[in-house]
Amino acid sequence: MDSWNFFDKFIILTIKNPPELASIIDKFKNIGIQNLEIYKFEKTGKVNAKKNMSLIEILTIKGCNNVCEDISKHYYEILYDVQLHDRVVIFEDDVEFCEPFNFDKLKRTVKWLKNNYWEMFYFGSITYPSIL
């Protein structure tokens, strides 16, 4: 069984008319994700967040400009749109996958998701801002 089949929907969050959209889509095809939905939003500027934000500041969008607020708003819009689905994966357009992609790790992760209660599972990592 293809482990990606466990998920109902795959979404990419991006700006309108990103110049590298074809290469973004190719990244997903290379790891077996074909059925992508692309949510395009207006670019409002560059994120200007202070470094070394606390977790509370990140979650409450303190210490960040209106771009952070816009990104959060876009996530809420997506979550509202997909509320009838149980297992949705949301990617940002700058996602990077490990090479070679570890399909065994994905299979183990999906097995864990099937056997445990969860409401939100975070696949990625946060590299900026750093959390103290």
Image: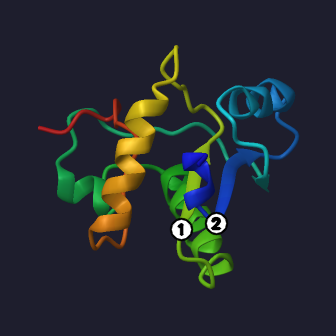
Q: Residue furthest front?
A: 1
Residue at image point 82% right, 34% down: 18
The residues tagged by marks 1 and 2 sit, at their Cα atoms, a distance apart of 5 Å
Task: Examine the image and state in which quarter residue 89 appears.
Answer: bottom right
Q: Earlier in the sequence, mark 1 or mark 2?
A: 2
Quadrant where the C terminus sits is top left
Where is residue 46 drawn, in percent x and y?
58, 36
Residue, disc 1 = 87
> What amino acid type is highlighted by mark number 1?
Arg
Q: Give the image location of residue 94, x and y in percent.
A: 60, 31
Q: In screen coordinates, is 53 left or right of 13?
A: left
Of the pair 89 and 108, the residue shown nearer to us: 108
Q: In the image, residue 107 lies at what x, y percent?
A: 43, 43
Residue at (86% x, 28% y) in the render: 22
Residue 101 pos. (x, y %): 52, 23
- Say whether marks 1 and 2 touch (CB < 8 Å): yes
Give the camera-side residue of 115 and 42: 115
Type of amino acid under label 2: Asp
From the viewer's perspective, tell me whether residue 113 is left or right of residue 28: left
Q: Circle 2 sits on which residue?
A: 8
